[in-house]
Amino acid sequence: MAQLTPKEQRALRALKTAVRRGDDVNAEAIAAAASVSRSLVYGLSARMGYPSWRDLVTQLRYESSTVGQTHVTRGRTRKICDEIARHADGAILVRAIGDASICEPYLIRRLGAKGYRAVAYDAATMRAFSEDGGGLVILINESGLALFQECAEAMREGYETVVITSMLESPVALMANVAIALENNKSTLAEYEPNYFTAAVLTMIELVCSKLPALTGGVLG
Amino acid sequence: MSQFTQAEKAVVDRLASHVATQNVVSLTQLADECHVSKSTVVKALKKLGYNGYDEFACTFRIRSHHGKGGLVPQVLVVGDQDQHVEAVVRLLTDNAEKKNVVFASGEDTASLIASYLSRKLAFFDIFMPVTYDLEMVDNPRLERGFALFILHAGILQRRSTRDTHRHAGEQLMRRARERGFTIMTVADQDFEGLPLIPDLDLRIPTNDTVDLDLFASRVISLFECSLSRYAFMTLGRNGDA
């Protein structure tokens, strides 16, 4: 999926707000609310990989009806702990990509040691677990540009989603139920500045796992 | 500050207020604010121990980003962090075009770190594949570079085998030394049993609580600092020093 422009992000926010409030959703009203053109609003569905405008609105209505969205910049560790603890009886699927890709096996291992059913995300596994009642999908990506498809699929299958990213305005952050913001520091190689995003995620994983109660059967239980 | 002139003192005071608010200013801006020449600013910075404005700005950026967000450990390595970062940068600079390898020992955490570092160094054209094989250090066609050993006992193993843990790469480390590789280790503070004295031995603080392991976060942060300094030293200096 292409990166949304600032105007498109604004339109998506307006659309989500309208859907959440239960307003009648039409492209003209969204365009007016976001100060963008009507064609840009209609084009949003294609930009986000939906066959039609109607499909996008239907998907957002469905997500809005299941759980509200939370953007978290403070109390981040506690929020993830709460989400994991709420899904202790279900499956916890983890997907990380980019610099932070090592966070995927790291988190799975740490949760597994505490007795949680954590596995790597893939579409087939996600659908298989959804028949058992779903669970939680944790997505980790610095830019928030990748993993949009995974996020949408998981939500369609009834999962709750947590994304850990550096950009709360990114498509995945806008889509997920809970978006956790960590600061990053992107730079060019020639003027490279330390990027602590992965280190921060790893620290967060450790803090989360140190606070989570061990379940029966865990190595540390 | 007795060795500073009045003008230089003004520069240092102004600089301190910018540092306190994490505000980076350009050399020209700082000189204008203090009503002094740029050369006066540079002289003041040299008296503070920097080679010039660029080095100050680079150091400032590294340190100011380091504390943000509260999720990066403040203490990354045992001892003087700046000196260790400089040592890593020297190692990278001296071996950038040579054959380097990284070996991970202990639990999976070390392997994940090795994977991260191998990928990240490749961005800078420094090739350091992850290996467990003696053949990787035997008779390389390229000039011998460094062999990095990441030695992490980890929480699970530390509980049961804290005192007896010996890393699996002992043989590889000896062989790499015999073949002329520079040996670098990154290990837990309390890691014992190295088969030889490394050329560069970095010790990572071990957390006191049994269920909180910040080894990976610290090692990655340490290398991020080093890569920033490496980029400054080798890539970003053309014409702007």
Image (cartoon, helix red, strand yellow):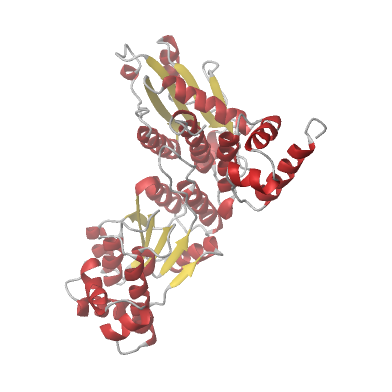
User: What residue appears at the point 39 percent right and 77 percent down from the top-left corner?
Assistant: A67
In the displayed image of the protein, which residue is found farthest to the bottom? A24
Residue A78 percent across, percent down from the top left: 54, 64
User: What residue appears at the point 52 percent right and 64 percent down from the top-left corner?
Assistant: A73
| Closer-to-camera residue (A16/A202) | A16
**Mark count:** 0
In the displayed image of the protein, which residue is found farthest to the left? A51
Residue A12 percent across, percent down from the top left: 33, 74
Residue A138 percent across, percent down from the top left: 38, 60
Residue B188 percent across, percent down from the top left: 56, 33
- Whether B58 is drawn above or below B125: the answer is below
- Whether B24 is drawn above or below B139: the answer is below
Can residue B212 be seen here? no
| In-image side of B171 versus A5 (left or right) | right
| In-image side of B113 versus A19 (left or right) | right
- Whether B18 is drawn above or below A3: the answer is above
> Could you say which quadrant of the image residue B205 lies in?
top right
Which quadrant is home to the N terminus of chain B? Answer: top right
| Closer-to-camera residue (B175/B12) | B12
| Closer-to-camera residue (A93/A128) | A93
| In-image side of B53 versus A160 (left or right) | right
> Could you say which quadrant of the image residue A8 lies in?
bottom left
User: What residue appears at the point 55 percent right and 47 percent down from the top-left corner?
Assistant: B65
> Could you say which quadrant of the image residue B143 lies in?
top left
Can residue B216 be seen here? yes
